[in-house]
Structure formats: structure tokens, C-alpha cells
Image (tube, helix red, strand yellow):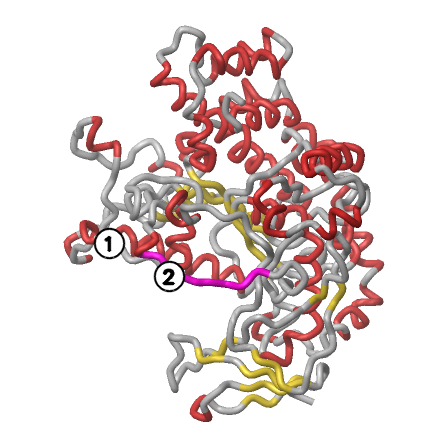
Amino acid sequence: MPAVEKPYHSGVPQVYHVLLNATFHGVDHPLSTPDVPIHQYLGIKYASVPARFRPSKLWKTYSPIVDASHPGPICPQPRSRSSYEETLLGISNDCSPQQVLKSDEFECLNLNITCLRDQRRAMEWLHHYIGEFGGDPGNITVFGISSGGADILYHLLSAANQIRPVFQRAIIQSALLDYNLPDVVNSGWHLSRVLSRLRITTMEQFRAYDADKLAILGHSIRVVDDGVFLRPDWKDYFAKPHDAHARHHYLLKDHIARAHSRARSRSAVRSLSRVPPSPAHTPRFAFPANLQPLIIGDCAVDATHWEHSISSWNASSAVRRIKAVCQSLLMASNIMRAYDISLHMPDEEISERLMDLVNDARVAWPTECVAHNAKRERGGRGVWRYVFDQESPSKGATHHAADLIYLFDTVPLPASSQSPTSSSPEMFCDSFDDDDDEGGFTFPLETDEDWATCVVNEWSYRRVRDAMQEKWISFAHGEAPWREDRFYVFGPEGETGERSNYIFEGRRRREVWKDAFEPLGMQLVQKVGVELSRGPV
């Protein structure tokens, strides 16, 4: 029996959910119109938390009338004088919409996600119940940025995804990937340090401790390599390309064999949703269900996430720390030579060099390795790579999470950026042939000061915004966003389009990674990046 939703003109949007035996009262989205109604159902509880540090449980029982007109509580957050938007995006609080959300650690699972297992629980809820809200449980795309992007990767590499996938596509943006995940023993040691700092000795005391005070501590472990959540071979995704090659054909055949063995039970899996996938949204990718198509990429300067800490280094301290982490003069020398770091470098220059090193060690190179190995596991198909080098309207330079401004289009352009779009020439084409890669455009000579910042005009902003939104939405509908043998560029200065690998070499330091990082391996490279990103503490 289908859900019954009242028409747009009836006032409050309502949905009677047959499976849940409840009527959900929502709100009209601000962009909703009589011709194109957009209804929102907010703060729907999808899981319960029986106690602090206990696994959540899927929520299935609702009152006959459910108020879904406002967001639900969020988990306790550390309080800061500066907002995320102001610190990272350079957007003042005056320009940001002000929201005051109640925090409640036991009532925060209202499709406001807190951790990996709770995220999985949210996907399971969608898989079961989204159909009667008009959604398609067979057409779910998950995406995340920064630590959220890393979460998406860990879901792709989870043991549960191998057995029972609950989403069909994934987008990973500037993921803060971590190869050196703590195991159960290390996590226990970390917990002991926290308990000692709080001067408590039992878990009962820990559960009773004030949640707001715990949030202030700032200690968090998002993922633990406990031998349960992640599949056993998850680290192969971080391997150097040639290391993964030998395993590729075996893995692909293994996944395909398991996909065929699950074919008989596919109808049982579909029955979980109670609503068959819509033919209009049938995915056009022919892959095993647990090898979801993937868009993955990074920003040019993702290390701005740690800019404050990195700026505290001086040359001598940074060199000593790199040598201490590498524990090999040869390995340390290779890294420092590749990034032009030396003991006698002026302190005002060391930050820029360290930013490049941290950016590559913590984001760019891991992203490249994951993209490469994901494509190998999918038989050379199903992975689309992009780079985001467009300047932020608020800062006039590219930085971590700048792509969110363009993707969601929720930040007004500065007054200096407002200019008629017709006055901006079409400087860039959507794609280059290989013969064009050596050519390009001739730009007027500019001073160093001109290159420090770039005013993002309305033309370049719209060009990048429209391209990014179009590619993401088409991918979510099961279409290939661009050619798989190319990568896509967003920026700088409004440039968009497909480019060849020859162009990629000029956008990212791939040769440096091959010479300086591959001999060290991911474990040591990430350890160097993490140590430098923390500052000289």
C-alpha cells in the first residue's frame, strides 16, 4: 500500500507511513513552489542510544503523529568562539545563518550523524523506510568531505558492505584518510589516559560524567581497526599502485564470484525496502553491489585545515622532527630534498614548504592511492577522479572545504565579486585533446602580489558551481559524470572540464610522490604528515 501525501496547497505536508503506522508532519522548503513542491521531513529519529558508549539500535516505533518540522538534537559539541565557517571558510558569523540546536547525547540520532556505526544505522533506516517518503532505496548516494569523506571510504571498505550493501554510489571529497588506525589495545591505552585525566576509574563513572565537559576534552577516535568493522584487506586500498597490481585480478574475480552467489538472495535483500527501485533511477553501472561507483578528489591546498599548527614550526625544529619520525637519515633527506626543506631555511619560508608536505602526505597522495586501487578492484572502471583548485569567494584563494561553497551555493558573493556575467569571456573549453595539452592560454604578466589572492567574479563562481552541481547530480542518478580515462578540473579562475593525465602532472606532485613517498610507504609518510600537522608540541 503506497504512502499518502496531501497536496501542496493543503498547508502542512503530511505523509502516512504504512510500515511505521505513523503520520509525519513536515515543512515546505523555502524553494518550494506550487509547480515544484519540495517537502522536508526533519529530525526523524532513526536509532536509539541505550547508554553512553553502547551501540545504537534501529528505531522502529513512533507515535501516531510525528512532528518532523524541525531538526532534532545534535550530539554534544565543543564550544568555540569562532564558528567552523569563520575559521576555515573565512565567512564571518554575520554572513552565516544562525542556528541554535539543542544537544542531547541520547536523542541525537535523528538523521544527524555522529559516528560510523550510527551512520550505518542511518543507511539501514533509509533502506527500510525511505520508499514511502518518495525515495528510492535502490538509488542512494552517500558523500562526505574531510573526516566525513574518510568515513565514506571506511563504509566502502567495511565488512558489512561486502555482505549487505545499503548504498549504490559514493563521493569522497578531500578525505582526511588515516592509514595508521588504532587497534583495540591502542584505543584502550588512549581511553586509560582520558580516564586518568578525569580522575575516574570505572566505566559507570565515565558514563555519568557531564557530556559537555567531555566534549571540551577534544579527544576522539573515529575509527578503530577492531577486526570487525573493516574488511581484512582494507589497507590494500592505500598500497602503492604496483603493490596492488598483483592482487587486482584475484580480488576482482573473488568479488564477482561472491556477487553471483548472492544473486539468488537478491530478491530477499530488495524485500527489505518493500518498494522496488524505480526504473527511471536504475543504475547504469554494471558492477557487483559491493563495488560501488566512486567519485573521488581533493583540493589544491587541503593542508589549510592545519595551517595554524603548521605555522608554529621553525626550520630547525621541523628538520629534527622529520628525522626523528623517519629514523633514517636517507629517508628524511629524500623527503626534505623533494619539498625543498633545509636546516638553514628562513622561518618565514618553512611554513609554505611544510604545508605542501603535509597536504600531500595526509590528503593528496592517499587520495591518489585510493583512487588507483579502487579503479583496479573495479576492473579499470567505475572511478572518476577530480581536482578542485578554484579559489574561495571569501578568501580569494583555494583552501580545504572551499568546494562546499560551490556545491551547496549558500554563501553570498562578496560585493567586490559582483560583476555582469556577460563581461567575462569564455576562456576555457570543456575538454582538451591530447594534442592541446602542451599548448594552453597566454595570460598577461602579473606581479607576485596579483597572484596572492584572486577576486572570484560572478562568472567564474557560476561556472564552477554549475559544473560541480551538474556532475554530482548526474552521478547520483546513475550517469557517468565524465569520461573515466580523464580527470575533471574545477578551477582555478573558473576553469572547468575534462583533462588528460598530462595536465594532472601539473596540478599535483605525482612524480614527487613516486620518488619521495613510495620508498617510505604509506605508514611512515602519514606519520610524518600527522606529526607536522600537529605543530611543535
Q: Is residue 249 visible?
A: no
Q: Between tags 1 and 2, which lies in front?
A: 2
Main SS of residues in magenta = loop
Q: Is 525 situated above or below 183?
A: above
| Residue at x 65% of width, y 58% of height | 105
199 magenta-colored: no
Residue 293 % position (x, y): 61, 53
Q: In the visual, does 512 lie left or right of 520? A: left
Q: Which residues are magenta?
A: 95-103
Count up the numbered dots.
Answer: 2
- Mark 2 residue type: Pro
Quadrant into which the N terminus falls: bottom right
- 53 or 329: which is nearer to us? 53
Q: Is residue 458 above or below residue 362?
A: below
Label placed on residue 97: 2
| Residue 460 placement (x, y as % from top left) | 27, 50
**Nearest the camera: 321 or 387?**
321
- Residue drawn at point x = 25 percent, y = 47 percent: 456
Quadrant of image for the C terminus: top right
- Snapshot quadrant of residue 523: top right
Residue situated furthest bottom in the rendering:
10
Q: Under tag 2, what secondary structure?
A: loop
Residue that numbered label 1 is attached to: 459
Viewer-closest of 21 and 289? 21
Q: Position of residue 33 (x, y in %)?
A: 38, 82
Residue 330 point in image, percent of width and height: 59, 7
**Front position in the image: 198 or 310:** 198
Contact? badges 1 and 2 (CB < 8 Å):
no
Question: Does the magenta segment cover residue 100?
Answer: yes
Q: Element type at marker 1?
A: helix
Query: Tag 1: residue type?
Result: Trp
Residue plotted at (63% across, 19% down): 520
